[in-house]
Image: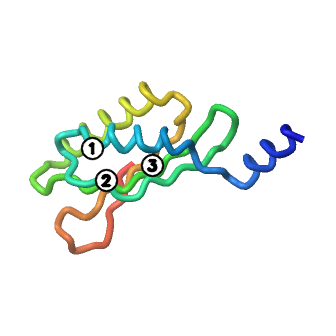
Amino acid sequence: MVLATESGALLVGESADPDQIRRVREIISSEPSVEAVGDLLTMQLGVDQVLLAATIKFRPDLSVSELESSIDRIERRIRQEEPTIKRIFIEAESLRGQAPQTRVA
């Protein structure tokens, strides 16, 4: 019965543990280049495999190089502190406010 329940939850794409999501939010928020953390969407892909999609608003004064470095640091730290998060997609909010959002992955 337990196996069927757990398997069913994985089949429908259950979200990650709320504590894990809170820790990821703290990791992202601690990056000095981040102004705000928006949606954090997670999906359990397997027993030890989580997908994370994060919307992040970065400081507007960052160069492209600084933005790339910041994203690399965030991804590296998330993977180090939350090893079950295997796939990370970061969506950077528009720095100029002209386009709704710009994808950076």
Marked residue nearer the N-terminal end (1 or 3): 1
According to the picture, the residue beneath numbered tag 2 turns out to be 37
Q: Nearer the viewer, mark 3 or mark 2?
A: 2
Task: Give amino acid for label 2.
Answer: Val
Q: Residues within 10 Å of mark 3 (few under 14, many from 20)?
A: some
Task: Give amino acid for label 1.
Answer: Ser
Quadrant (top left, top right, bottom left, bottom right) of the N terminus: top right
Measure the alpha-carbon separation of dots 1 and 2.
Answer: 7 Å
Check disc 1 and report its element: helix, strand or loop: helix
Check disc 2 and report its element: helix, strand or loop: strand
Residue 71 image-quadrant placement: top left
Question: How many discs mark residues in the rendered view?
Answer: 3
Check if mark 1's residue and mark 3's residue have beta carbons within 8 Å.
no
Counting from the top left corner in percent of width and height, residue 67 is at 22, 45
Marked residue nearer the N-terminal end (3 or 2): 2
- Name the residue at 13% across, 49% down: 62
87 displayed left or right of 38:
right
75 displayed left or right of 70:
right
According to the picture, the residue beneath numbered tag 1 turns out to be 29
Measure the alpha-carbon separation of dots 1 and 3.
Answer: 16 Å
Q: In the rendered image of this protein, does residue 57 appear above or below residue 96?
A: above
Outermost top residue = 80
According to the picture, the residue beneath numbered tag 3 turns out to be 89
Q: Residues within 10 Å of mark 2 (few under 14, many from 20)?
A: some
